[in-house]
Image (tube, rainbow, N blue to C red):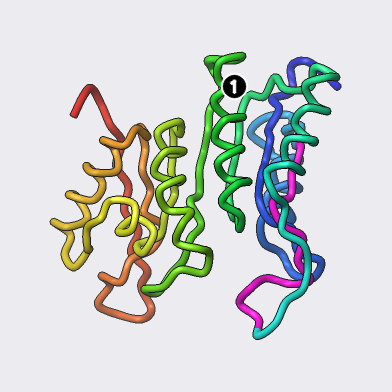
Amino acid sequence: MADDIPRVLSVQSHVVSGYVGNKCVTFPLQVSQSVNGFEVDTINSVQFSNHTGYPQWKGQVLKSTELEDLYVGLKLNRLTKYSFVLTGYVADESFLSKLADEIHELHSENSNMYYICDPVMGDDGHFYVADSLLPVYRNIISLADVITPNQFEAEALACMKIKTEEDVISVLSALHRLGPKMVVITSTNLAHSEDVLYGYGGEMIGNL
């Protein structure tokens, strides 16, 4: 493993059929043209037969104990110096809480580590994970450099509703105050046409 290749830890879902989570992120990063690829390590937060948009799915949800086992194994072999950490879908509250602890530890070992958090919780007005994950996400995004919520997730994290572009600005400011320097709201319901998708972003410069 070359020392000059940036290393990424991606903690997301895995599905047998389909392409979401770690199956989506690994190959594009490995063959990135902007650099000589990334070394990508993956931890699967869940292993499902298919994504949860289907009527049914089967599989396993990892808990904090399984995550800790994997992380300790990496530490024992001195494999935890990451340039980037990406996190996505997590289904278990204990797993997410443990993940927050480990990200904090990883950052203490490498202050230049860049953390990108997709706080996957729901869409279209409803949660598809337990809402008990919400306060944990409010804690974990304080560690993030970038967060990428959709409109529903941004509203839940900020405890505010988005009905206008002025509301978007207020929500972006509220999320910046939770810690992340960059916030990208990946989709909203503000478009005037079904053929158009509006996303919004904000970058914090200085102090709010």
The kind of residue tagged 1 is: Glu
Where residue 9 sits: x, y (%)? Answer: 68, 35
Where residue 88 sits: x, y (%)? Answer: 58, 50
Q: Which residues are magenta?
A: 41-54
Q: Which residue bears the numbered disc 1? A: 105
Where residue 26 sits: x, y (%)? Answer: 73, 46
127 on left or right of 46: left
Q: Residue at x 61, y 34 (%)?
A: 85
Q: Quadrant of residue 81?
A: top right
57 inside magenta stretch: no
203 on left or right of 105: left
From the image, which quarter does the N terminus lie in? top right
Q: Secondary structure at mark 1?
A: helix
202 on left or right of 119: left
Q: Residue at x 25, y 70 (%)?
A: 190
Q: Compared with residue 66, is residue 143 higher up or lower down, i.e. above or below?
A: above
Q: Residue at x 53, y 64 (%)?
A: 129
From the image, which quarter does the C terminus lie in? top left
50 inside magenta stretch: yes
Residues 183 and 142: in front is 142
Residues 120 and 7: in front is 120
